[in-house]
Image (cartoon, rainbow, N blue to C red):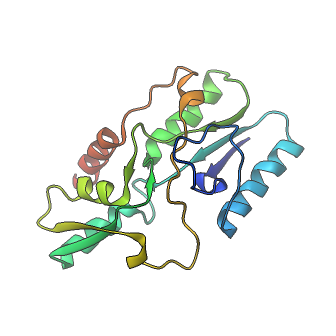
Amino acid sequence: MVYISTDYVFDGTNEGEYEVGAPVNPKNEYGKAKLAGEEAVKVILDDYYIIRTSWFFGKYGKNFVYTMLRLARDHDKLTVVNDQFGRPTWTRTLVEFMTYLVDNDQPFGTYQLSNEGSCSWYEFASEILKDQNVEVAPVDSNAYPAKAYRPRHSIMSLMKAESTGFEIIDWQSALKQFMGEIEE
């Protein structure tokens, strides 16, 4: 079984990278539900891959890239939070990693996978919109009060995923490839 989990199993207070075995401490219902799923998988199965990931973008569904592109069509200026940090994940990279684990008989267990590098939402938005006619300005999270807690710093270590031999491209390259595909 492959179970997709989230960086929200962590509380977001760590200044460094969260290792796979770091203590979990979800602060919202989404993180708690995903952690409960991880625990159920571990109890029920012996042969499983749990993959924690974050900040999805890809061809299907709603995501931050599509939201920024849509907003840029109707606004001259966008404000984006610059005090929340994480790792963007192209869904293609995630799917390729899942396939790699299975096809290469990698050890079962918990992995963390996103694209290489980290950024703030502001930096991510700036990269998405660098070729658009829109100003992107940084603000802190207080400008956008959220109903649910969002981790401020949810950068997960990719060391275990990298140790399998899987090559992870950086988020900027992944974003560039993705943007090229959606422009076609």
- As rendered, which of 89 and 160 lies closer to the eye? 160
Position of 120 compared to 112: left or right? left
Name which quarter of the figure residue 140 lies in: bottom left
Relative to 147, 92 lies left or right: left
* Residue 8 as seen in the image, left or right of residue 71: right
The N terminus - image quarter: top right
The x, y position of residue 69, in whole percent, is: 26, 66
Displayed quadrant of residue 28: bottom right
Identify which residue, 119 or 184, lies in the foreground: 119
Which image quadrant is residue 131 in? Answer: bottom left
> Does residue 143 lie above or below 98 as drawn?
below
The structure residue drawn at horizontal position 58% and vertical position 22%, both measured from the top left corner, is 164
Q: Position of residue 49 (x, y in %)?
A: 70, 37
Looking at this view, name the residue that lies furthest to the left: 133
Residue ranking furthest to the right: 44
Residue ID at (56%, 79%): 147
Instruction: State the count of labels.
Output: 0
Q: Which residue is depicted at the point 45% across and 47% down?
A: 87
Q: Is residue 60 above or below residue 110?
A: below
Q: Is residue 2 above or below residue 76?
A: above
Of residue 170 and residue 146, the one placed in the foreground of this image is 146
Q: Residue at x 64, y 49 (%)?
A: 4
- Residue 90, image x and y in percent? 42, 46
